Amino acid sequence: MKAVIQRVSESSVTINNEIVAQIQKGLLVLVGIEDTDNQEDIVWLTSKIANLRIFADEKDVMNLSLKDIDGDMVVVSQFTLHALTKKGNRPSYIKASRPEIAIPLYESFVKQMEIELGKNIQTGQFGADMKVSLVNDGPVTIIIDTKNKE
């Protein structure tokens, strides 16, 4: 499971010209799922993201987590995070899970994240053509892969 975490001052997801998710200060998390991902990956990743100390404290040092600031979150499924680009110019998405595997894991990820944060989070729609808007604050962008937990 791969995640791109972006600290944002605002973010939104629009589908068919309708805003389906919108937050102010918090995180936009893009999640890519592959067949080997499981509940253990979800628990580890959601805890890691919820507790990442990437928000400024009173001394303007990145020392606070999303939990600490009671920030909001938008989670968007993004299979292209598993793009293979070694051969040719057309990315291959063979490592990305098909919907029958990915959807239950994505839904489990969202539920586990809500447990971690103790609040509802907003999401895009799995498989939809989404327009994701954000103002990256910092900028701060972090990539985490559960296959590399070092």
Image: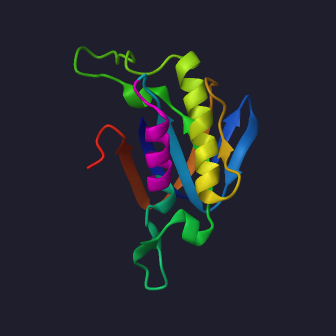
Q: Give the residue drawn at x 50%, y 31%.
A: 78
In the displayed structure, 64 sits above or below 83; it is: below
Is 137 placed left or right of 21 in the picture?
Answer: left
Q: Where is residue 80? Give x, y as percent.
A: 44, 27
Residue 118 seen: yes
Dominant secondary-structure state across the stretch colored magenta: helix
Q: Give the residue drawn at x 58%, y 60%.
A: 26
In the displayed structure, 25 sits above or below 30; it is: below
Is 13 placed left or right of 19 in the picture?
Answer: left
Highlighted range, magenta: 36-48
Q: Is residue 89 magenta?
A: no
Name the quadrant of the N terminus: top left
Q: Where is residue 18? Give x, y as percent.
A: 77, 36
Task: In the displayed orientation, state which residue is furthest to the right.
Answer: 18
In the displayed structure, 99 sits above or below 138; it is: above
Image quarter of residue 68: bottom right
Q: Where is residue 127? Give x, y as percent.
A: 61, 23
Q: Where is residue 146? Give x, y as percent.
A: 36, 40
